Every structure is written in C-alpha cells, then in structure tokens.
Image: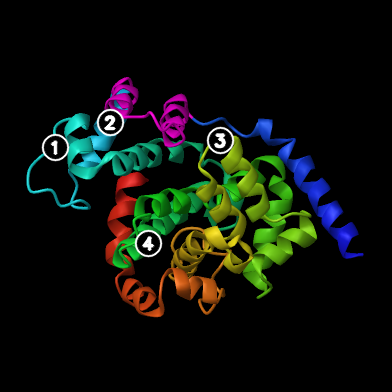
Amino acid sequence: MQTQTVLRTQERIEELVGSLQTIPTLPQVTARITQTINDPKSTAASLHRIIAHDPALVSRLLRVVNSAFYARSSEVDSVERAIVLLGFDTVRNLAIAATLGQLFKGHMCEGFTARDLWDHCIAVAVVAREMAKMNDDPAAEEAFLAGLVHDVGLLAGLQVCRGKLRQVCERAKREPTPFTLIELEIIGVDHQELGAAVARKWGFPESCAVAAAHHHHPSLADDAWQRMAGLIHAADTLCCQHRVGFHLTAASQSLDDAAVLGAAGADVIERVRSRMPDLVGPALALFR
C-alpha cells in the first residue's frame, strides 16, 4: 500500500513537472549568472562581464551595495569594486536577487499575492545567512541563495495548478493542518517536491534543490545536506512566525527538530528572533 502511494505521488510530481514549460524561464541575465555557480572556471571578471551588459542591473546592484544594509564607509562606484569588497559569491547572489523577483507575479489567495511570497523568500534568505554567519559557517552565502529559492515550488504551483493552490491557501488560513498535508490532499504533491524540480530545472546548485525539497522536514534530507535544510527550516519558521510576506506554510512549525538545532542552535535562533525587524526590514525595502 505504501509503495502504491509513493508511486502515485511520483506520477503526480512527473505530471506537474511535465507542465513546467508553462513557468517563465529565468531572465537571461539571471540564467547566465546562475551558470557561474556550477562553473569552477568562473572568475570575478566573467561575473563582471555578465552584469555589465545590463545597465539596469548595474544600477540596482550598486544601490544595494551602497545602502545602509551593507554600511560601507565609502561609496562603491563600480561592479568590479563591489566584487573586491564584498566577494564574488555575495555580489553574484545579490545580482540573482535583484533579477529573480520579476517572476513573482499573480494572486495566490485572498490577502496574498506572489509579491508577498517574494518578500518571504528575501526574508528567509537574509535570516538564513545571518544565522550561518553567527555560527561561523562558511556556507553563509550558499544559505542566502538556498533561502532565496526555497519556496519556488509555490511559484510553480501558481502557474500549473493555480486554482488548487488557492484552495490550499484558503484552508490553511482556517485550520491548523500543516500546509504540506493540505497540498498532498488537494494537489497530490507538495511545494517542496515541486520546488526541488524547479531549482534543478533552473540550474541552481544541489544545496538549493535540497533546501526546497526538505525545508519543512530537514531530518529527511541526506546526512550531508541536513545542516543546510535545517538552517532554511529555522529561517523559514522565524519568518512565518513573524508574518513576513506569505506566512501560511510554517506559522505553527516547530523549531525543536534535532536537525534544526544542529544547524542553527537554540541560542542563535533566539538572538536572531529578537532582531527580526532590523534584519528583514532593510532587505525588503531594497529588493521589492
């Protein structure tokens, strides 16, 4: 019986993934920047060439770099200088964040739009990076990117099963049943499985696919990826508890999972919780 259920779920995933051509492709500049993640030969110069071809992106990127969010003591007037000061990974992720948001369009359900979902993704990215930094985790920028795309399965659902996703959201507002269980009942697959497929389709690194696939149940991730999944789970939960953007997926989610505590730590979670407005507010103002 369990095997049959798994097969039916897999069939549903394949059915929806087969419809993913209806989802907008990444903006060309975002796709080219994403390719640098998986290319060991990528350099600061190659990233600069990609960004420099988009004057609007250059302008927005420099606005972010020179904002209070990064508290630079002197103005940064070029992408090359930004890469030197902030590092390749940080500038690459900021460029992705500056362009990815344009895909989040549409109405999810009463009270929530896709822009609210984007706000939530930005917040999770910032909070995950901050917790990683507080733990001296070298994967802080990787956590930012994973947080940024952790809920792309909802974006996919908005395109391939909009009506059913609206039903899920409306029920989640009325009852305490976990969001993913309502998805399985109504859609036949949850946004984690769909999100992992989208992350891979778009060429994001495996850490992003794993974060998308297991951010509600990090202990189910392979051992090598539990730390990242747990970190995104913690950030996601804090952002939903603080009702940042689209917050229906994890408002009642627990932070007691061993994988979560191992990734973030109870002390770090509480310290970040106390700083949520200061962490999230400036980031939302920049990337909306």
Looking at marks 2 and 1 on the same chain, the residue that comes earlier in the sequence is marked by: 2
The reply to whether callout 4 and callout 3 are in contact (CB within 8 Å) is: no
Alpha-carbon span between mark 4 and mark 2 = 26 Å
Identify which residue is drawn at 50% across, 66% down.
Answer: 230
The reply to whether callout 2 and callout 1 are in contact (CB within 8 Å) is: no
Q: Which residue is mark 2?
A: 44
Residue 98: which quarter of the image? Answer: top left
Q: Which residue is mark 3?
A: 202
Alpha-carbon span between mark 4 and mark 3 = 23 Å
Rendered location of residue 169, percent (x, y): 65, 60
| Magenta region, main secondary structure | helix
Q: Residue 76 shows which numbered tag?
A: 1
Residue 38 is covered by the magenta coloring = yes
Considering depth in this image, is 126 or 112 the residue closer to the camera?
126
Q: Which residue is mark 4?
A: 127
Q: Nearer the viewer, mark 4 or mark 2?
A: 2
Identify which residue is drawn at 19% across, 47% down.
Answer: 67
Rendered location of residue 60, percent (x, y): 28, 35
